[in-house]
């Protein structure tokens, strides 16, 4: 649920301190097959497998630290019997995925390289467009963020749809009609009619002027985008690391409580059941 860097401490316990990670499970399955982002929260995802090795895909939105640093701490993946496919956005220089990750995960920055994890790990890239991943239909679109190519994803099993845009800077494309960012075609396409939109809410409105250049959105944008795109439920995600439980209660009060879409503030360990 957290953005930028983990946030341990007494004032963060209710909403949680691990960085971005969302595990997606099919209706009829016991265990997740698709994991969105490998932030520090990936460490917790092992619990969902109850000791079993992971057999599935980790799909990364982009390569910022808060979305990849959990990779070597995923016990269910770093396991002799595991099968893990890691997919990340195609890089402008077309470097192989394992080499891109090894740039931050290799000595002297880290003791081992991605290819040294136990189990059968493969590394690949995704291009914008639609493809099948672990039995889901996944649409990838490039969205504005900052420093490095970033994708938003729309994941569907044919009857339920989840849209995931944890890091999104819509003001990079202009102020838009509400002054909080452009409602651009990629964001609208990803979100259209989704059951759940998990979206960047790193900034509060009073911070937007000073901090928009860091590449994030205000929660108000997520709600307004959801309204335009006919989304049923918005989950405000990627909380600023210094955002206390009290401040997030305030966010829930300010943006929650309306009719449609329903709005909630992401809480670590929460389970969302899609209709
Ligand atoms: Zn992030
Ligand atoms: Zn980022």
Image: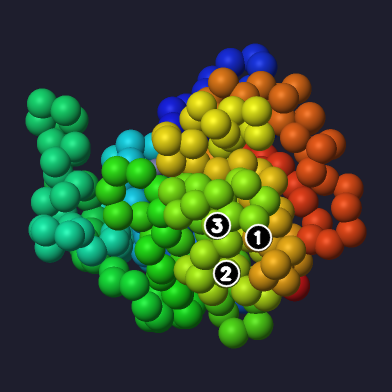
**Dot 2 or dot 1, earlier in sequence:** 2
Instruction: Give the residue drawn at x 66%, y 17%.
Output: 11
Label 3 sits on a secondary structure element that is loop
Q: Residue 188 carries which label?
A: 2
Residue 9 versus residue 158 in the image, above or below = above
State whether residue 22 appears in this view: no
Residue 174: give x, y in percent of width and height.
49, 52
Number of marks drawn: 3
Residue 121: give x, y in percent of width and height.
23, 59
Pointer 1: what residue? 225
Instruction: Give the residue drawn at x 33%, y 41%.
Output: 64
Q: Are marks 3 and 2 in contact (CB under 8 Å)?
A: no
Q: Would residue 168 be found to the left or right of residue 233 on screen?
A: left
Residue 227: give x, y in percent of width and height.
74, 63
**Dot 3 or dot 2, earlier in sequence:** 3
Q: Are marks 2 and 1 in contact (CB under 8 Å)?
A: yes
Dot 1 surroundings within 10 Å: few (below 14), some, or many (20 or more)?
many
């Amino acid at each position: 649920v957290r953005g930028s860097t983990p946030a341990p401490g007494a004032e963060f316990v209710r909403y949680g301190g691990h960085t971005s990670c969302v595990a997606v499970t099919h209706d009829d399955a016991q265990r997740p097959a698709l994991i969105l982002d490998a932030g520090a929260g990936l460490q917790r995802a092992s619990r969902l497998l109850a000791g079993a090795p992971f057999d599935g895909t980790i799909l990364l939105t982009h390569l910022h630290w808060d979305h990849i640093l959990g990779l070597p701490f995923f016990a269910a993946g770093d396991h002799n019997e595991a099968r893990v496919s890691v997919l990340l956005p195609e890089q402008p220089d077309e470097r192989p995925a394992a080499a891109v990750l090894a740039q931050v995960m290799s000595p002297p920055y880290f003791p081992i390289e991605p290819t040294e994890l136990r189990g059968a790990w493969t590394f690949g890239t995704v291009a914008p467009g639609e493809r099948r991943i672990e039995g889901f239909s996944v649409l990838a679109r490039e969205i504005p963020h900052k420093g490095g190519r970033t994708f938003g994803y729309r994941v569907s099993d044919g009857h339920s749809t989840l849209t995931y845009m944890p890091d999104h800077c819509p003001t990079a494309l202009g102020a838009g009609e509400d002054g909080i960012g452009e409602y651009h075609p990629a964001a609208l396409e990803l979100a259209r009619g989704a059951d759940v939109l998990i979206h960047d809410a790193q900034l509060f409105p009073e911070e937007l002027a000073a901090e928009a250049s860091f590449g994030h959105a205000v929660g108000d944008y997520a709600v307004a985008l959801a309204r335009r795109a006919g989304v049923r439920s918005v989950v405000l995600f990627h909380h600023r690391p210094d955002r206390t439980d009290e401040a997030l209660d305030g966010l829930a009060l300010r943006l929650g409580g309306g009719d449609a879409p329903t709005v909630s503030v992401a809480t670590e360990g929460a389970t969302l059941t899609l209709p």
